[in-house]
């Protein structure tokens, strides 16, 4: 996210495509529901995000 924000600050940048794919070894793979739960937990720790206003969807990892 920091790299995307930095790219938006570059003069004349009109758009940024953030299409990063991370390939993990089979032993580190997580299911979509597991990833969503982990993301939701991490976001809940951010006091700037109102509780009850979060919805996380993960598709194909």
Image: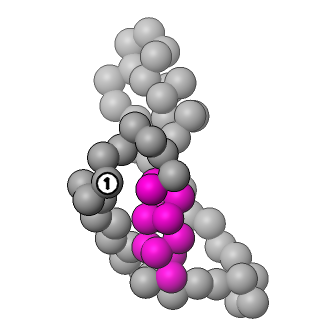
Q: Residue sitting at 34 percent across and 31 percent down?
A: 15
Q: Residue sitting at 64 percent across and 84 percent down?
A: 29
Q: Residue sitting at 46 percent across and 54 percent down?
A: 43
- Percent across and percent down for residue 60 are 42, 80
Question: What range of the chain is rendered magenta?
Answer: 34-44
Viewer can see residue 18: yes
- Percent across and percent down for residue 36 are 43, 73
Residue 2 counted in the magenta span: no
- Percent across and percent down for residue 59 are 37, 76
Indicate whether 61 appears above or below 39.
below
Q: Residue sitting at 33 percent across and 70 percent down?
A: 57
- In the shown orientation, is residue 39 left or right of residue 49? right
Name the residue furthest top: 11
Residue 39 counted in the magenta span: yes
Foreground pick, 56 / 17: 56
Foreground pick, 23 / 47: 47
Label 1 Cα neighbours within 10 Å, binned few <14 / some 14-19 / many ≥20: few
- Magenta stretch, overall SS: helix
Foreground pick, 43 / 47: 47
- In the shown orientation, is residue 39 left or right of residue 57? right
By what rule are the colours in the image chosen? Answer: one colour
- Percent across and percent down for residue 53 are 24, 55
């Amino acid at each position: 996210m920091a790299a995307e924000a930095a790219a938006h600050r570059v003069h004349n940048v009109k758009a940024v495509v953030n299409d990063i794919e991370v390939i993990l070894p089979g032993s580190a793979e997580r299911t979509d529901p597991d990833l969503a739960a982990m993301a939701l937990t991490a976001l809940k720790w951010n006091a700037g995000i109102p509780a009850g206003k979060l919805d996380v969807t993960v598709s194909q990892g």
